[in-house]
RNA sequence: UAGGGCGUAGCCAAGCGGAAAGGCAGCGGCCUUUGGAGCCGCCAUUCGGAGGUUCGAAUCCUCCCGCCCUAACCA
């Protein structure tokens, strides 16, 4: 751990420890709802909770907040576990809020007996109206005081009877709720007699049809934390206004521990969306190929794209933990990926847009194996042999018949180095029937074998190449921002966020690579020299390896071109 | 409107009364068998604004401005 930085939450934990709170214990948890796959924003949440537990010698648990059976599925609990493990996170236990349903039910009866909760017959619309929901008149938004439900003063006995019958299934869905009796004039709307239970006949992914009443988030969350012995309950800013209620419920109950809720600002990234709601629309609307589409900020998408767990962790750590809600530049994420990938990726040559190059003075039918360095950043990675012959492929963009002044690559009459091979000089070109460039013809200097000229002469460019007869076919999927704008959810007029989708987020090329790529396994990573970092996609089949471009390499020439 | 939050460079972010860290991006240069990587340099006379307290304020006080969140029987 090179994480010497701190943040306001760690400061709080440190202070609690100094004051001897919680008997010197630290316990955190991460409580996802299993209603979709998780993304980097979630990673920030569990990396924080996990990191705190690690750093203070505490316990970290994973708890599924599965209190809404209509949205949750086993598929997502499995997926979430898999994604967290991939990112390198571990926990002591996996818990489910649904395992606490019986305890929660008993505690609800405790509140009813104490006159702190009542069964309400108001409909959802009426509850909203009585609560004092904001109304807009003449552009003025008013938040009226709430008014008491007509059922608020039922006796504890009547409430207990009704609540038990709710559980027994005597009433139709939505006909009644159990509500906490707090204060309908409270300035915080969450305190205006919040709903604790609703009647809902839906099959729960773990409880089946055992229940027809389900606790709400507010009634389940703090109590679940207390049951588990959580000391520091972190969540995003969206729950800030729920904290008084979180505390109120715990105040009413005979809980042994008092968790403390602390909120932080969520992570947002430019050029993408970061909420399950929007990600789901992209997936279900067919705008991307699935939850693991490499363009998505989902952990599965990032894994498939080739992002490294370490790079993601470094990135999340670098963005810090504060209460401000900023939007981080995706370039920062890419920076940490390149940093990690540069250190660890084996280099290989692959041509993404091939054009044939023939070395006219190289003997026909001959070939030789040349030494190539696997990773200049890591001598331990060693070297490999790569085949060279008379007919090669080079990158089409590495040749220009009429080069501008800053173009250092190949052009008629000019000499360049073929990486690890020889200096070659372009003598002429061959055109096809339509006059299009079909082949580049060169001569090579046998004395420059390996790439150095004994006479000390220099070239301004080194090109990657691949031997035509030995190369393997490959498909390269090049990704760009999913959205054209930094914040796609910001739209004007008739436009919708989907209008901000980029038409260039995926470009497919068919290229050729060094023969060693033939045996590449899914998720294996490489750097294609001068082109970027690539990761083998599971779509690969025998004879056709598919690569996802994780990130490009900085390209100074392209940059001067763009400017 | 009420309640809750947040405002330090293009982005993220340190800083907590002694006088603006760092990273990303950007811009120059060096180096280079990846125009990669690396290395060097530049990039806030000023911290949303205005007052005040103080020898001294991004840090304390007052007022103002802006932005975000909530107003589900979702989490």
Image (cartoon, coloured by chain):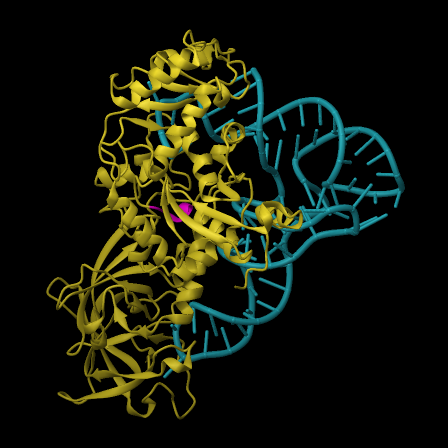
Chain colours: A yellow, B cyan
* Nearest the eye: A52 or A319: A52
Say whether residue B27 is left or right of residue A211.
Answer: right
Residue found farthest to the top: A150
Residue B40 percent location from the top left of the image: 61, 69
With respect to residue A514, does A486 lie above or below? Answer: above
Q: Is residue A87 visible?
A: yes
Say whether residue A10 is left or right of residue B70.
Answer: right
User: What residue is at 40 percent from the left and 46 percent from the top?
Assistant: A42
| Secondary structure mostly seen in the magenta stretch | helix
* Nearest the eye: A187 or A148: A148
The stretch drawn in magenta includes residue A30: no
Residue A233 percent location from the top left of the image: 50, 42
Residue A407 percent location from the top left of the image: 38, 67
With respect to residue A185, does B48 lie above or below? Answer: below
* Nearest the eye: A189 or A312: A189
Q: In which quadrant is the C terminus of chain A drawn?
A: bottom left
Residue A295 percent location from the top left of the image: 31, 50
Which residues fall within the magenta stretch? Answer: A38-43
* Nearest the eye: A70 or A204: A204
Say whether residue B63 is left or right of residue A254.
Answer: right
Quadrant in the rendering for residue A403 = bottom left
Q: Is residue A127 visible?
A: no
User: What residue is at 40 percent from the left and 56 percent from the top?
Assistant: A89
Quadrant in the rendering for residue A91 = bottom left
Q: How many marks?
A: 0
């Amino acid at each position: 751990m090179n994480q010497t930085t701190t943040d306001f939450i760690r400061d709080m934990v440190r202070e609690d420890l100094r004051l001897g709170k919680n008997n010197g214990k630290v316990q955190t948890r991460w409580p996802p709802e299993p209603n979709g796959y998780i993304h980097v924003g979630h990673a920030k949440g569990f990396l924080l909770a996990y990191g705190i537990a690690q750093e203070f010698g505490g316990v970290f648990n994973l708890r599924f907040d599965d209190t809404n059976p209509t949205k949750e599925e086993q598929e997502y609990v499995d997926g979430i576990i898999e994604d967290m493990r991939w990112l390198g996170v571990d926990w002591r236990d996996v818990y489910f809020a649904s395992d606490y349903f019986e305890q929660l039910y008993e505690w609800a009866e405790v509140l009813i007996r104490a006159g702190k909760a009542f069964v309400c017959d108001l409909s959802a619309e009426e509850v909203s109206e009585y609560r004092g929901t904001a109304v807009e008149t003449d552009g003025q938004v008013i938040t009226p005081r709430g008014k008491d439900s007509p059922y608020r003063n039922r006796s504890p006995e009547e409430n207990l009877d009704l609540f038990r019958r709710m559980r027994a299934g005597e009433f139709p869905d939505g006909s009644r709720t159990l509500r906490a009796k707090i204060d309908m004039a409270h300035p915080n709307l969450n305190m205006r007699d919040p709903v604790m239970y609703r009647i809902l006949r839906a099959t729960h992914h773990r409880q089946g049809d055992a229940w027809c009443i389900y606790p709400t988030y507010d009634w389940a969350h703090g109590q679940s934390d207390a049951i588990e012995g959580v000391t520091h309950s972190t969540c995003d800013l969206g729950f800030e206004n729920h904290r008084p209620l979180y505390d109120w419920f715990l105040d009413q109950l005979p809980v042994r521990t008092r968790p403390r809720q602390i909120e932080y600002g969520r992570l947002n990234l430019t050029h993408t969306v970061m909420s399950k709601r929007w990600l789901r629309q992209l997936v279900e609307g067919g705008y991307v190929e699935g939850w693991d589409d490499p363009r998505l900020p989902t952990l599965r998408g990032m894994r498939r794209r080739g992002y490294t767990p370490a790079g993601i962790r470094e990135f999340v750590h670098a963005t810090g933990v504060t209460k401000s809600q900023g939007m981080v530049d995706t370039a920062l994420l890419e920076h940490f990926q390149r940093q990690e990938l540069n250190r660890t990726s084996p280099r290989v040559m692959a041509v993404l847009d091939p054009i044939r190059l023939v070395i006219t003075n190289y003997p026909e039918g001959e070939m030789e194996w040349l030494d190539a360095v696997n990773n200049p950043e890591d001598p331990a990675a060693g070297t490999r042999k790569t085949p060279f012959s008379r007919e090669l492929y080079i990158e089409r963009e590495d040749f220009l018949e009429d080069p501008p002044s800053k173009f250092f690559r190949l052009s008629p009459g000019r000499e360049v180095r073929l990486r690890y091979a020889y200096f070659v000089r372009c003598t002429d070109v061959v055109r096809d029937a339509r006059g299009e460039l079909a082949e580049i013809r060169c001569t090579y200097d046998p004395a420059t074998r390996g790439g150095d000229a004994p006479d000390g002469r220099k070239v301004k460019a080194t090109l990657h190449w691949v031997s035509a007869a030995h190369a393997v076919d490959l498909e390269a999927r090049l990704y760009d921002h999913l959205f054209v704008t930094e914040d796609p959810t910001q739209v004007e007029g008739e436009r919708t966020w989907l209008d901000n989708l980029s038409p260039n987020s995926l470009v497919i090329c068919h290229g050729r690579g060094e023969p060693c790529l033939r045996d590449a396994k899914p998720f294996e990573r490489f750097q294609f020299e001068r082109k970027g970092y690539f990761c083998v996609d599971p779509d690969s089949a025998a004879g056709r390896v598919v690569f996802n471009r994780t990130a490009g390499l900085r390209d100074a020439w392209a940059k001067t071109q763009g400017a």
